[in-house]
Image (tube, grey):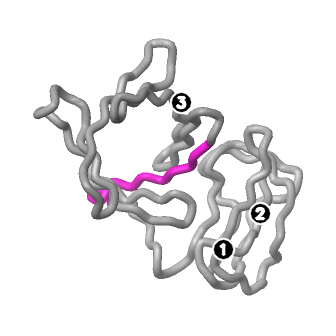
Amino acid sequence: MIFDAYFGDQPHKVKLEEDMRNGGGYLVTIDKGDPFHVDVIDKLAGGYSLLYKGKSYEFDIESKDNLYNVLSRGNLYCVELIHQKSTSARLKEFGEKKIISRMPGKIIKVLAKVGDAVTKGQGLIIMEAMKMENELKAPSSGKVKEIKVKEGKTVDAGVDLLLIE
């Protein structure tokens, strides 16, 4: 399977194949790098264990639609995975861009107003999630078309927060 993976603003191509030559597990290729083998174990008590080069990495995953929040060793990683065959693939270069909440949280501050011109990477919303403040940045330059949240309100994962045209 081939996925478009988005870590924040960075797109990557991820290819996953079952690795029958090594007794199971997966062969993973990221972008045009060399493939590597991983074993993934679904733990009965919840969460997962990933074995890579003899080291074990424990992690928990919370997901909604194509959005995945991965918690490992006290670090939270927000990933969007879109199967390349999916008809719901997002447009990266054309049309409107959305800022979407990657996890449930509280909107602390909205740093832009409707009609503001914004540049790629500019902070637009500060959101508190898992006791940490996160600055959500513009995925591209454009103009703020719509703000769908208010300061002090809580939001669920996968909710549209702001629209840029």
Which residue matches tag 2?
125
**Could you give the CA–CA distance between mark 1 and mark 2, rounded to whole angstroms?**
12 Å
Residue occupying image coordinates x 78% and y 78%: 114
Does the residue at mark 3 contact the one at mark 2 (Cβ under 8 Å)? no
Q: Position of residue 76 (x, y in %)?
A: 62, 42
Q: Is residue 28 left or right of residue 157?
A: left
In terms of depth relative to the viewer, which is nearer, 121 or 125? 121
Which residue matches tag 3?
60
Q: Position of residue 4 (x, y in %)?
A: 37, 59
Label 3: few (<14), some or many (≥20) within 10 Å?
some
**Could you give the CA–CA distance between mark 3 and mark 2, rounded to whole angstroms?**
26 Å
Which residue matches tag 1?
121
Q: Position of residue 109 (x, y in %)?
A: 86, 60
Instruction: Name above or below for residue 92 compared with residue 142.
Output: above
Asked if residue 77 is among those painted magenta in the image, a careful observer would answer yes
Residue occupying image coordinates x 60% and y 50%: 158
Q: Farthest top residue?
A: 44
Which quadrant of the view contains residue 14? bottom left
Secondary element under disc 2, as helix, strand or loop, is strand
Secondary element under disc 3, as helix, strand or loop, is strand
Name the residue type under label 1. Gly
Q: Which residues are magenta?
A: 76-87
Residue occupying image coordinates x 52% and y 34%: 61
Secondary element under disc 1, as helix, strand or loop, is loop
